[in-house]
Image (cartoon, rainbow, N blue to C red):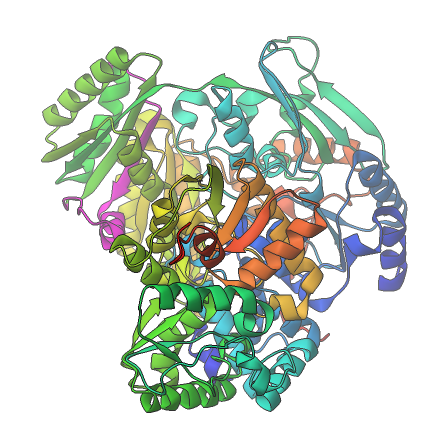
Amino acid sequence: MLGRDDICRFLASVVGEDDVSVNVADLYAYSMDASMRMSMPVAVARPENREEVAEILKWADENRVPICPRGAGTSLSGQAVPVKGAVVLDMCKMDKIKEIDLEDRVAVVEPGVIYDDLNRELGKLGYVFPPDPGSAIACTVGGMVANNASGIRALKYGATVDHVLGLEVVLPGGEIIKVGGRVWKSSSGLNLTKLFVGSEGALGIFTEIILKITPKPRHHGLTIPVFQKLEQALETTVEIMRRGILPSAMELIDDICIMIINNVLEEKLPMGEALLFIENDGYSKVTVEEESRVVRKICEENGAQKIIYTTDAGRIEELMRLRHTLANMLSKLRGENIPLNNVQDFAVPIGSIPEAVRELKAVAQSHGRLMAIFGHIGDGNIHIGTAINPWREEDRKAGAEFARKLADIVVKKYGGTLSAEHGLGVTKASLVELEHGDTLEYMRAIKRVFDPHGIMNPGVMGLLEVPRDEFVYMPTRVVA
Amino acid sequence: MEELEKFKTQIAMCNICAWCRAKCPVYGITKWESEGPRGRMILLRGVVYGLLEPTPDVVEKIYECTSCAMCNINCDAEISPLDVMLGARRAFSKAGVAPPSPNKKMDSRIVRDKNPYGASQKERFQWLNDPLPERSDNVLFVGCVNAFRHPETMKRAVSILRAAGYEFTVLKDEVCCGMHPYWDGQTELAKQLAERNAALFDKAGASTIVTPCAGCYSTFLRSYPELVGNFGFKIRHLSEVIRDIAKEGGIELRREGTVKVTYHDPCHLGRHCNFYDPPRELIKLIPGVELAEMEKSRAEANCCGGGGGLFTLKPELSVRIAEKRVREAEATGAKYLVTVCPLCRTNLDLASKRLESQLRVCDVVDLVASRLKTAGGE
């Protein structure tokens, strides 16, 4: 087994001394992502091109050194938390937008490009890469692809997977392969591109990504209806879709979240059990206004007590930003506790939303648990905010039981999923079998094809057996 | 670590989301997780829960910050990574493990010489030839950087004020405002300097303190009330005073062709004190001068890299940050990059020269002085 000095020496010979660190401060900073789970890597390296990535993966495979690829570390499920003894590959230096081709309508980027930076450049040309995750300001395109990330506009525009046309991937062993390409349609062979999207760094490392780009909608209308009863809001979302309207976003916010938002909003939102953020967008102002009018009518029919409607771009941006930041604002509720992140990202079939949300709320109530519900309700994605005290064993245990109970309901009763857009990471690894059952073995077999020695991001998605206490909320004391 | 304990809840509430990191000037250059606000929050989470020792490596990361406050405006959990950073610096200083050596040396020089340059106090006002009254309602607090590094600008400032008949004096015994030790976490030293200056302001019979320095301004406005308690002086930036004078016709400004300038918001005036308009208004009062805003301005303005003690700790990193800002200024097509902070000016000027940029960096005082109609005509 290689010692830290050997590892450091090798990495420095590939990426240069300035881009390797074994400094305790660096290792500690890279031990965590937004999931708040922690595990110390042995070193951090920052490759600058695919050749460097390939050289490192070849060496890592030969020497059985685990590798944890990292974008911006904004993952809420612990995809960027390294298994103990791993080398973190921070992809921040591979951050070039290599090409924007308006004729082919593609963008070719390196994995470390920040989502917002890409959209700033695309925006100048009237285009957008639309999945719009909450972490848009910081997350990388590579991280989004690895995670199949999405956000509030996935309802109309789809998740990351719907926009990835091709990938260049470095496999363990150092082989560089290309999957997919620049064509918008292909029915040629097994779709390896889609296999790699959402693979959470467990199969290889992306060094180039080819994305579809989408014309940027010119007009927006935002409707915010407030409802006395949660059920009225939920029925409204179902009815809007039933009438054939496809909003660009349809977000649910419950009473706890309204209170949180009102804390920072000058013009307070009216209180009710729930409100919706319904955004319609399009090329034509007339169409957007007509769709918005029908949306308002449906809201009224379902008993909305108040409806805010605006087409002002600045106001829409301000209000949508509030929705984007809601998950972060929930930290005011948890204080020193830590989010229970394996229940944060369920999805159920759209028709089951009202019943499922009601049931999850009832379970929380019966457990005496403060729980906020919000999310991309239009596509069945339910975000849940609840927290545990990481220092108390009984709290951790109660949290785990609660998570299993909710997961059971979502998966078994409603045929839902553990994760709509955050990925499984390390936080949901213990629940994977519940959803995937026997098919998990097929996933493990695929993992072995690409990564026979199991060096790529061990611990994610339950593909490899890693001790459960490997990824903890607080590590043991670190000695420099 | 009592000082850090106060911030335990804030540290725990941090979502580790990286929104703060997205616009951090230091992270923007180095791209090391530990060298941005989120990385610092992770490190301090370890320290405050007793899991990580504040080793020299850890401490140094806490000092790799320009105190620009960009992290604060991007935090939706409404915590202040900046306050946490300052609390940590204080805690580490109290524990004797900080500041890092270059900063400590700088603070020692301030103790010895009352300025950071190792210069004699006698040199502070060597540039000032005109006699000024012993006492006045208005005290012009020049600050160390202007006094020792930009005396020509200060001569011009005095000329402008005199031309307008503005009554003021200076403190011959003026000492460093304490900004450097304050942000180094050396609160006791900052307090001593603050008390000394406060006594001098009293002695001069001042009610208003006018300063040409963004750092001194924010130190008086934001830090002195904490350091000396009841600090009841009115604080004005020199650009504000000259704007009023020019507006009221106290000085006449002449056109000298047309020129495009851009304005850099110093972080300690802008985000720290919400002071954005007076320098812009002053620039717009100069005939023939067109103000072109940079892509990032006002609360969104990028930092010059010079603050928070970073210029002392890592001058190369500091100038690299300034180079980015110079590039942004160049993109406006301006001939002059105008600012109202001598530290920003020094750093931006270094960067501009290193980039061999055509952009000329100056203080707004220099721009105004170059367009001043003298008593004898144009």
Image spot of residue A431 (x, y percent): 53, 46
Decide whether residue B367 is among the magenta residues: no
Q: Which residues are magenta?
A: A243-271
Q: Residue at x 19, y 35 (%)?
A: A231
- Does residue A430 appear to the left or right of B194 in the view shown? right
Q: Is residue A274 left or right of residue B58?
A: left
Q: In percent of the image, x 22 and y 48: which residue is there?
A: A255
Where in the figure is residue B180, as x and y percent of width and height?
A: 54, 76
For the residue pair B194 and B161, the one nearer the viewer reads as B161
A324, above or below A17, in the image: above
Q: Residue B195, position in %: x, y?
A: 41, 89
- Say which quadrant the N terminus of chain A sits in: bottom right
Q: Is residue A334 above or below residue A186?
A: below
Residue drawn where x is 67% and y is 37% of the image: A95
Q: Residue at left 60%, top 83%?
A: B107
Answer with the quarter of the image where residue B236 lies. Answer: bottom left
- As drawn, B240 above or below A203: below
Who is closer to the viewer here, B195 or B378? B378
The picture places residue B333, in percent across and down from the top left corner, at: 54, 35
Residue B106 vs residue B138: left or right? right
How many marks are shown on the rendered structure? 0
| Residue B304 appears anywhere in the view | yes
Which quadrant holds the C terminus of chain A?
bottom right
